[in-house]
Image (spheres, helix red, strand yellow):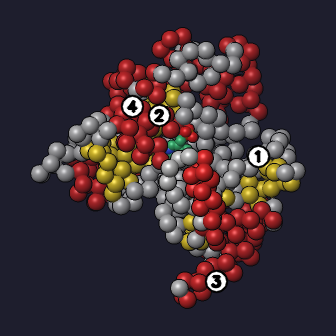
Amino acid sequence: MKRTTAGLEAALAELSRAQLRRERTTVGAFAAPGNRTLVLVGGREFIDFSGNDYLGLAHHPALSAALSAAAAKSGVGSGASHLISGHGAEHERLEEELAAFTGRERALLFSTGYMANLAVLTALAGRGERVLLDRLCHASLIDGARLSGATLRRYPHADAEAAAGLLGGADEEPAVLVATDGLFSMDGDLAPLPALAHAAGASDAWLVVDDAHGLGVLGASGRGTLEHFGLSAREVPVLVGTLGKAFGSFGAFVAGGRDLIEHLIQRARTYIYTTALPQPLAAATRAALALAQGESWRRERLHELTVRFRREALRAGLPLGNSSTPIQPVLLGTARAALAAQRALAEAGLWVVAIRPPTVPAGGARLRVTLSAAHTEAQVERLIGELERICTPLLRSECAAGASA
Ligand SMILES: *Cc1c(COP(=O)(O)O)cnc(C)c1O
């Protein structure tokens, strides 16, 4: 379809017809200051089970205090890119702390995880080379691979054996890089990192793990999916982390060896040609990092709530995914069913969002439930009760529709 105004209008109408049109919601001031589990939408209060603030840090007073103090001292905007005059003391300290936290020689800050992934892929792969990605990996890894000019191959989700097969070497040049999410954002399951690390290591390919959802959440000290599996910096040479999820702030980083980071500084266009992340955000992230490390009760509580949710939701017969993490998909199949469930839950005062294609594969529409250490047991009980009341009849009619089709 030509992208004239009329063409755009027709394309949008088609999205609406297929129940795939996305809508934004303006979220009002939080109903209870300091408590991110309640949101106000259109003057009504909802319990939020849709965010990525897993440790309940986004509204922590220590973060806002650090942010205000840094803004008073160094201003709000960085005023320039890191290589001109935008790189400040808060950036430098946060990078050192992130390197120590992840057990790597260096870390490099980016404004977003999206940009960090574009940087890694374009800096480590290029035309005439092959890169391998998990079929369900984050969009930013796919876009990075496309931008790199390398040939992109995707292996079946979480299938390390298939990845090893595609790495090649016998009759073609081995792939130069394998990239995956650590903890998958829409399914809540984990990548088979030990086997991927083994395969990548054996053919001398870079293994890139984007642990946006695992950092802060998994592992005894919150070091993420790598800590969960006991993997070293040698086994996973490139780690991407984001700061807007469990750390409750904003921004992202790449952690790795000295030469890798220096190469990114010299070559990565999403690092070089953009204004540096505001220093107050780096200061807030430092406060969050200290809390995430010091207050392990947040991780323990999150884990307890997750175990409770799964136990009771499975007892209620809800179709959960194969996830033991705070991301708990309720698999409803069609976009129509997922949207109907989202609307009915909203009626009941619960904010849970339907995820539809193309974010998930066709037939994989779902409610994406996420838990936070800030939720109460009573809130989780209420969620399970409403999910059972709303989803059970929807699933029954989906089955009936499937059987008669
Ligand atoms: C959220 C996310 C990103 C993007 O991070 P931003 O900082 O929000 O741009 C990248 N990868 C994964 C797996 C994510 O979930």
Residue under the image location 81 percent in, 66 percent down: 348
- Asked whether mark 2 lies closer than 8 Å to ligand 1, one says yes
Residue under the image location 61 percent in, 42 percent down: 245
Please report whichever mark, 2 or 3, sits nearer to the chain's N-terminal start.
Answer: 2
Residue under the image location 16 percent in, 44 percent down: 173
Looking at numbered disc 1 in the image, what kind of residue is underneath it?
Thr
On the image, the x and y values in percent for residue 386 come to 75, 70
Q: Point out which mark residue 188 bears.
A: none
Please report whichever mark, 3 or 4, sits nearer to the chain's N-terminal start.
Answer: 4
Please report whichever mark, 1 or 4, sits nearer to the chain's N-terminal start.
Answer: 1
Q: Nearer the observer, disc 3 or disc 4?
A: 3
User: In the displayed structure, does residue 312 sit left or right of residue 226?
Assistant: right
Q: Secondary structure at mark 4?
A: strand
- Spatial CA span between label 1 and label 4: 38 Å
Is 44 in front, or is 230? 44
- Spatial CA span between label 2 and label 3: 43 Å
- Spatial CA span between label 1 and label 2: 27 Å
Please report whichever mark, 1 or 3, sits nearer to the chain's N-terminal start.
Answer: 1
Q: Which residue is mark 3?
A: 396
Q: Secondary structure at mark 3?
A: helix
Q: Nearer the observer, disc 1 or disc 2?
A: 1
Q: Point out which mark residue 116 bears.
A: 2
Looking at numbered disc 4 in the image, what kind of residue is underneath it?
Gly
Looking at numbered disc 3 in the image, what kind of residue is underneath it?
Arg
Q: Which residue is mark 1?
A: 26
Q: Nearer the observer, disc 1 or disc 3?
A: 1
Q: Is residue 238 visible?
A: no
